[in-house]
Image (spheres, rainbow, N blue to C red):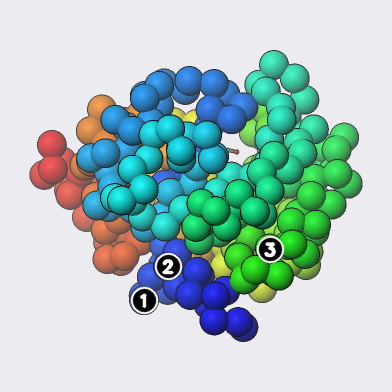
């Protein structure tokens, strides 16, 4: 592996082999999501606790201080909104922009089984072709759009394996029962996505812990952190699972002690 590629991956995946990515890219199709109306304010208290930020170029340039940030995973797919078919994405941001912004990785969504499956998989393959030239890793997001019920091991293992086959260096997917089926069938690291806010915090601690035990290397989890009433307590609790091997119960104790 080339020096640049290795260096970028080591910015994202820490010495313990784990990672905690903070996504704030939601506005690219959801608009001003609750608690993310002002991204700079949302992430300011969280900055010490995440390892990398997943963000679009627009929010990066307008809201993130270039002199005080963490490695950037640049969201480069989009062109759709919640009002229409989410799978109809294109690549929105060039490699030249990514290099200008000094990013550590690129991220895009694939929609396996959707009407635009082929286009989104071509987006991934073409992006990898370009990104490899410059030593930039690509993270594929196995998106399900509005069809959250698609989140099972059979479907997600298919998506993750396809993403890896097409050259993704990291794959982000949803937690589900039998998560090991996904990690065992995917030759590149898998990170757990969050999804809409759950009813209880303990559910989040449990699914993150379960996913880590079954082979995930970390999370890319947003709303369940910054839509919580105590986002700093939440991120510290989750960080203790990812980088500190805490149990869900221990994470819950950390959450309550941090309020
Ligand atoms: C949207 C994304 C987001 O990064 C992803 O959904 C993670 O955020 P959350 O934990 O809020 O779901 O890729 O397609």
Instruction: Name the quadrant of the N terminus.
Output: bottom right
Q: Secondary structure at mark 1?
A: loop
| Mark 3, residue position | 131
Quadrant in the picture for residue 36? top left
Residue 250 located left or right of residue 104: left
Q: Earlier in the sequence, mark 3 or mark 2?
A: 2
Q: Which residue is mark 2?
A: 11
Mark on residue 112? none
Q: Which label sits in the foreground, 1 or 3?
A: 3
| Circle 3: element type | helix
**Residue for point 79% across, 49% down:** 123
For disc 2, does the CB lie below 8 Å from ligand 1?
Answer: no
Q: Residue 83, relative to residue 200: is it above or below?
A: above
Q: Disc 1 marks which residue?
A: 15
| Residue lying at 13% horizontally and 43% vertically, measured from the top left | 258
The residue sitting at the top extreme is 83
Relative depth, front residue between 216 and 66: 66
Residue 51 seen from this side: yes
Q: Residues within 10 Å of mark 2 (few under 14, many from 20)?
A: some
Q: Position of residue 259 (x, y in %)?
A: 13, 36
Q: Is residue 5 above or below residue 259?
A: below
Q: Quadrant of residue 225?
A: top left
| Front label number (1 vs 2) | 2
On the question of residue 220 being in view, the answer is no
Q: Give the image location of residue 80, x and y in percent.
A: 71, 27
Residue 126 falls left or right of residue 33: right
3D distance between C-alphas at marks 1 and 3: 24 Å
| Residue at position x 37%, y 40% in the image | 64
Q: Secondary structure at mark 2?
A: helix
């Amino acid at each position: 592996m080339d020096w640049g590629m290795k260096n970028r991956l080591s910015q994202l995946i820490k010495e313990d082999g784990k990672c905690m990515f903070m996504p704030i890219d939601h506005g690219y199709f959801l608009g001003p999501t609750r608690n993310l109306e002002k991204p700079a304010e949302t992430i300011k208290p969280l900055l010490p606790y995440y390892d990398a930020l997943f963000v679009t170029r627009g929010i990066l340039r307008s809201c993130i201080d270039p002199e005080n940030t963490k490695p950037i995973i640049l969201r480069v797919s989009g062109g759709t909104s919640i009002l229409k078919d989410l799978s109809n994405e294109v690549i929105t941001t060039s490699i030249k922009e990514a290099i200008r912004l000094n990013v550590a990785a690129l991220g895009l969504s694939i929609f396996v089984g959707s009407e635009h499956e082929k286009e989104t998989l071509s987006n991934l393959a073409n992006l990898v072709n370009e990104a490899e030239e410059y030593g930039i890793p690509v993270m594929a997001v196995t998106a399900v759009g509005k069809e959250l019920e698609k989140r099972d091991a059979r479907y997600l293992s298919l998506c993750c394996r396809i993403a890896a086959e097409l050259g993704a260096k990291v794959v982000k997917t949803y937690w589900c029962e039998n998560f090991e089926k996904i990690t065992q069938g995917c030759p590149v690291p898998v990170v757990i996505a969050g999804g809409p806010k759950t009813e209880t915090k303990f559910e989040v601690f449990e699914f993150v812990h379960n996913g880590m035990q079954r082979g995930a290397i970390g999370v890319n989890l947003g709303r369940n952190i910054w839509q919580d009433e105590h986002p700093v307590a939440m991120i510290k609790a989750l960080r203790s699972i990812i980088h500190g091997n805490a149990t869900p119960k221990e994470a819950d104790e950390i959450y309550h002690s941090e309020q």
